[in-house]
Image: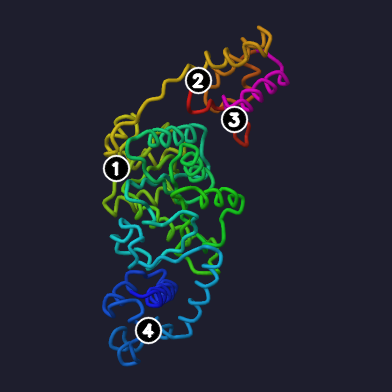
Amino acid sequence: MEHSDIFSERVASCTLNRIFGFNPGAGRLIIEAAGSAMGVFELDRDGLDDLMGPFNRFRSQITTDELDKSASELGRLESLGYEFIPLSDRRYPGMLRDCADAPLGLYVRSDSPLEPLSGDGAVISIVGTRDMSPYGKEWCQRIVDALARCGQKPVIVSGLALGVDITAHMSALEAGLPTIAVLPTYITDIYPPQHRRAAARIASSPGSALVSDYPPGTSPQAISFLRRNRIIAGMSQATILIESKTKGGGLITANLAFDYSRDVYALPGRVDDPRSQGCNRLIRAKVAEPIDDLDTFIKSLGLGTSRRRDRAGLREEIESYYGTRLEDAELRLITEMAGIIRERRGISTEELCQDRGCSWAEASRLTGLLEADGFIERDMFGRCSVKFRF
């Protein structure tokens, strides 16, 4: 194809994606019948009536005015460095193309060459609840870290949401893995807004991208997230559910992946923790395989083995790091606190005070040191957890 023909096909695909956004299967059939997306708009009135029927609700939108609207939109996007990749483009994710309800095109924001969008290797999606526990965060980080140490390094896909999604994205980047964030809004909009900086980091990282199939003006409504989830599941050879209640977007994504005949894994959790009930239910129903051993999990993905890292233990690292910085009594206390935090994931500063018999000020100061120096992390509720590497 000449450049003008490629652009025309992209404009036509963008237009049909906007028209058939919630019914991409019908749009795909019409494109196949016409021979191309542009071929749909080259049909005369009788041809369109024969193809779609005179009373089809989409028929009135197959106009040159709609094409002009898309051409202007794509021109604006190109000036920003964004792109629209139609279903017919070789860079379109191959596994997603195999899904009957695949979008007719994808808006993409990335500073990396898109050859193809999701690479030639494995693509793994990691999803779950926004209300993630310290246990879920730790194991999300552990899983991504193990994937990063495989011989075949995968692309990590998620939805940029709070909780599991953003943890998966950031853990991937920190481990040197590319990551793709699928948005529930138009490609120039970021939801939630507090993740704008993270989105910019993703778009500027090698092999990473922001992706959406939504046209301009799309607001983040409930149905937007459902439509987004099928892209996450469809792009991936395997989907991992970290934590989920009995209802939630992560659970929907995992079930979609199962319907696409993709591998599904779930992190088992306590039977009395609502955030693990969705995972435990999928495991009981044989929809998902449990992640109860990282080596076994990695092998089941066909990514080879995950090379282990030789690290000193938590106690040894703390004693080495603070040995010349703290008095003996403080060194013993901070070491004991770190050990308790490792054994009792999610413990609060107040509970540490009670356990060690120290003042709140002292416990707060020492846990602050541990957090600042990268040994532990605290969530918004002040719950402490040891960093996953220990």
Looking at the image, which residue sits at the far top?
328
Crowding at mark 4 (Cα within 10 Å: few <14, some 14-19, many 20+): many
Q: Are marks 2 and 3 in contact (CB under 8 Å)?
A: no
Mark carried by residue 41: 4
Q: Quadrant of the N terminus?
A: bottom left
Q: Amino acid at mark 4?
A: Phe
Q: Is residue 8 above or below residue 355?
A: below
In the image: residue 388, left or right of residue 45: right
Cα distance in 3D space between marks 4 and 3: 58 Å
Give the distance between the C-alpha atoms of the residues marked 1 and 2, in whole angstroms: 31 Å
Residue highlighted by disc 3: 383
Among the two numbered marks 1 and 3 on one chain, the one whose residue lies closer to the N terminus: 1
- Using the rendered image of the protein, determine whether residue 248 is visible from the camera's viewpoint: no
Circle 1 residue = 285
Residue 187 coordinates in the image, percent (x, y): 52, 62
Q: Which three-letter amino acid code belongs to the residue tagged 2? A: Glu
Foreground tag (1 vs 3): 3
- In percent of width and height, residue 124 lies at 37, 45
Q: Are marks 1 and 4 in contact (CB under 8 Å)?
A: no
Q: Residue at x 52, y 51 (%)?
A: 204
The first of marks 1 and 4 along the sequence is: 4
CA gap, disc 2 and disc 3: 13 Å
The image shows residue 366 at horizontal and vertical percentages of: 66, 20
Q: Are marks 4 and 3 in contact (CB under 8 Å)?
A: no
Disc 2, SS: helix
